[in-house]
Amino acid sequence: MSTSQATTTRKRKPRTTAIPVMETVICRICGNIISKDESAKFDDYQLCDYCFDATTCICDCCDKRIWNDDNVGDYETRLCQDCYERHYTRCGDCGIVINNDNAHRFEGNEYDYYCYYCYSQPRENVVIHNYSYKPTPVFYGDSTINRYFGVELEIDDGGKENDNAHHLLQTANRIHEHIYIKNDGSLSDGFEIVTHPMTLSYHINEMSWQKLTQKALRLGYKSHKTQTCGLHVHVNRNTFGEDIAIQELCISRILFILERFWQEFLRFSRRTQDEVTHWARRYGFRQEPTEILNTAKSGNFDRYTCLNLTNVNTIEFRIFKGTLKANTIIGTLQLVNHLCDMAFSMATDDVTELSWIDFVEKIDKNRYPELITYMKERRLYINEPVEMEEDS
């Protein structure tokens, strides 16, 4: 073969394509690692999209973005401090934010302003107290049991009439003052039923939840079937001990269990993800309970969280949606009690190893029949579903 006929083969170098390196940042709120391109920067903090939406809002007056903690309005009217001071006030009865142009004042009262509804009510017949009303608490139940539950049940769509409130008060307060009723600016056409602190046994055996919820339904109220109503449960902090450090250790374990089993508690709560983000947002999971508590204490969080820690004497479970089904209320109280028992009795290392099956199996079936039934209805009880009775 001649040289001219010979073919020469050359090895081609593989073509390489440079892979761009994704720049990442750590969300200042939840600690997740995210792409910088998919993050938001606010007030010199780098935030993931979820935390950005959950912890900030836009002032409805000047369109300035602010932290939720700096919102001095409410969820209906979000306001920065400057706009509130210049253009708004709060109703002296229901606490709703009102524009100064729509505020009313009674003759001889130089200090309080009122929305039109509260201004138009006969003052001598008011049985629906203002939002800030806090009577001296009356503790019901066995005094040797140092755990009390105060319930706030929001009901809506049935009116704010004193007559309706009278009917509910007469139903629950036949012997003792078990409840009082307050206005709530977050509700469209209803109010908030608040109990005095009671032991779990007293709630189950003495508090007339069945009659009260049935009366509310007959009066046309809804709770579960709204987008506004919650079922909030307060628990006294000193149930975990008088020492503040021990109290906080137990609370950190509660937070850990809530965050670790977030999807299960969300299913139990009956809230949608949007409703939780709006009214009861989470703090974010961490590997250690104390890390979650530190995030809760140091982050930009207000009371609209799954576990509100802003009260001095109580912690407030806000994750649960409202209901006018008495057994759901009882089952919810039993769940909260079980959760508090676990946080109080278990070592932190054991809590971090806890599985959902472990949590469920430790529920006392004889003490908590309403809770067991409800968890089966919500498909949360070890593959033992039952037919669900609809909430109202």
Image (tube, rainbow, N blue to C red):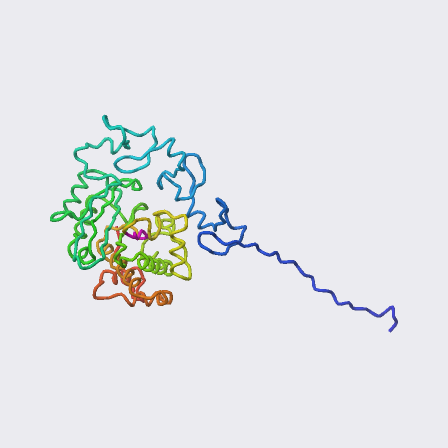
Q: Quadrant of the N terminus?
A: bottom right
In the image: residue 390, left or right of residue 57: left
Instruction: Judge by depth and name the residue closer to the eye, 337 or 248.
Output: 248
Q: Position of residue 104 (x, y in %)?
A: 28, 29
Where is residue 242? Give x, y as percent. 27, 57
Residue 75, given in percent of the width and then of the height, sits at 36, 42
**Left or right: residue 324 compared with residue 354:** left
As for residue 315 lying within the magenta part, the answer is: yes
Which stretch is magenta?
314-319
Judged by its main secondary structure, the magenta piece is strand
Can you name the residue that lies furthest to the top here? 107
In magenta segment, residue 338: no
Q: Residue at 33% of width from left, 36% of height from top?
A: 97
Residue 52 x, y percent position in the rendering: 45, 47
Res 131 quadrant in image: top left
Q: How many marks?
A: 0
- Could you tell me which residue is drawn at 29 percent across and 35 percent down? 91
In front of the other: 293 or 207: 293
Name the image quarter holding residue 62.
top left
Q: Nearer the viewer, residue 135 or 380?
A: 135
132 to 122, vertically: above or below: below
Q: Is residue 253 above or below residue 101?
A: below
Give the quadrant of residue 365: bottom left
Q: Residue furthest left?
A: 175
- Furthest-bottom residue in this view: 1
State the residue in front, 274 or 247. Answer: 247
339 w.r.t. 183: above or below: below
Q: Name the residue rendered at 25%, 42% in the picture.
A: 191
